[in-house]
Image: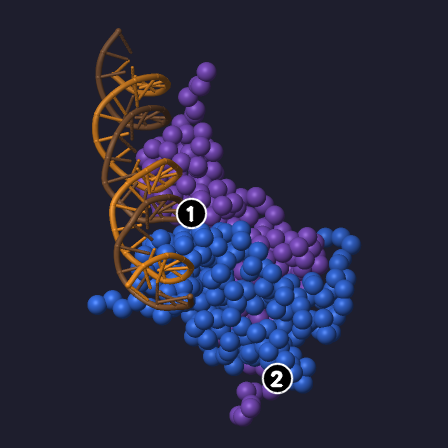
Chain colours: A blue, B purple, C brown, D orange
Amino acid sequence: MSPRRAPGESRAAILEAARTQFAEVGYQHATIRRIARVAGVDPALVIQYFGSKDDLLAASLQMPVDIAALTAGIEDHPDLGTELVRRALAIWESPPVRAALLGMLRTGMSHQRAGDVLSALLQRSVLGVVQRYATGEDATFRAALVGAQMAGLAMGRLALHVPELAEASIEQLANAVGPTVTRYLTGDLAGAHPPRPRS
Amino acid sequence: MSPRRAPGESRAAILEAARTQFAEVGYQHATIRRIARVAGVDPALVIQYFGSKDDLLAASLQMPVDIAALTAGIEDHPDLGTELVRRALAIWESPPVRAALLGMLRTGMSHQRAGDVLSALLQRSVLGVVQRYATGEDATFRAALVGAQMAGLAMGRLALHVPELAEASIEQLANAVGPTVTRYLTGDLAGAHPPRPRS
DNA sequence: GCCCGTTATCAACGCGCGTTGAGAATATGA
DNA sequence: TCATATTCTCAACGCGCGTTGATAACGGGC
């Protein structure tokens, strides 16, 4: 009636269920029991394999995306930012990536560990590109700006389902947001007029 | 030893404690018992006053900021976006505003009600300004873009404490992000070159 | 001085949670 | 075939949660 699964299969099922549940309902409602039910497994097995719920979360948040590939050959494009946004938006369409990203967003706002992972991801995934054009502390500032812009976009499009962002085409958003990213990467950030002395 | 408080005082204390706790630890860990303890009150009193934890959350998320005042007279400034970002960042320094905003961010990612409140706030607070320069569905798209940019900024600066954003001065961030907002409000969003037919 | 609505406390409820430890079922290798 | 390791289930634990209903303390109006 219930033939035993192949070795490693249950573990994989748990991990996948955890990813989707963390993404869909957040840390609080993605209970061990719920994840186990989705995976078709006993709750105790989840603990047996992953040790604790927190460890399971950590295992679930591994970003299944090759950042190097995401940014490879990008300097050949005339508009750097637009191409970058286009690639990012395209990769977000992939269910595993979307799940991991949503998991980070849903969880990272209220869970220390996921928050660290999230902000590290924002920095790391952008810093590589930035450092081809800027150096030193300027580079990390530029990376943080790009990260903030992309995080806001992900939040609106994927998590909150703001209609204007969720239903827009990749090309439309790339055209709208791309120049912003280009400017954060390579533009002048000090402003046209320096900070006014008064008022 | 424990003189009874003035009428309405306990209610206010509960509300304030709820705001700070939702902001600091998110919906899950901001338990009724914890909020009650911070407010110096019995947990049952919290329910008595607010009905349920969800109702308490709704009451806590009322944005204590006059959006009209925030954007008043803004069209006099040469750089619209920079001034808008400057004002927003300044208002975020206020503890009550910061608490409400953090509460929305921390909670909105995993709680339907707060998510709706958050995305409504993003749209509403910007739409007023946008509609002075754009019309129709273009206006809501522009508002969504500004909202996403500001949400990402709030997330990095207030919630995740990304050092480059959290420690930057208001002026520095206004100069960096301002032009982006200006462009989202009034610029050309279709891109310099229209979407290429191939590749 | 008494009454009554407001303000507050207390003990308890049922529930779902993460986690544990014992042990059953199944595969593996000699 | 039999031991042995792996995979999995089961029942139960202690805990903190949101919420409830009875009941106590207080304060203003007659």
Crowd around label 1: few <14 · some 14–19 · many ≥20 (10 Å): some
Q: Do the residues labelled 1 and 2 touch (CB within 8 Å)?
A: no
Q: In this view, does C1 lie above or below A6?
A: above
Left or right, A197 with respect to B123, comes to right
Q: Position of residue B171 (x, y in %)?
A: 70, 57
Q: Label 2 belongs to which residue?
A: B192
Q: Position of residue B123 (x, y in %)?
A: 47, 63
Q: Residue at x 50, y 58 (%)?
A: A58
Q: Quadrant of residue A24?
A: bottom left
**What amino acid type is highlighted by mark number 2?**
Ala
Q: Is mark 2 on a helix, strand or loop?
A: loop
Q: Is residue C9 left or right of residue B181?
A: left
Q: Which mark is residue B28?
A: 1
Q: On what subunit does the disc labeled 2 rest?
A: B
Please identify the quarter of the rendering in which residue B18 is found.
top left
Q: Is residue B196 visible?
A: yes
* Relative to A45, B197 lies left or right: right
Residue B67 in sight: no
The correct choice, above or below, for B164 with respect to B140 in the image is above
Q: Position of residue B133 (x, y in %)?
A: 55, 70
Relative vertical location of residue A182 with respect to residue B16 in this rendering, above or below: below
User: Can you tell which mark lies on residue A160?
Assistant: none
The N terminus of chain A lies in which quarter of the figure?
bottom left
Q: Distance between the residues labelled 1 and 2?
A: 46 Å
Q: Residue at 66%, 55% (x, y): give it.
A: B163
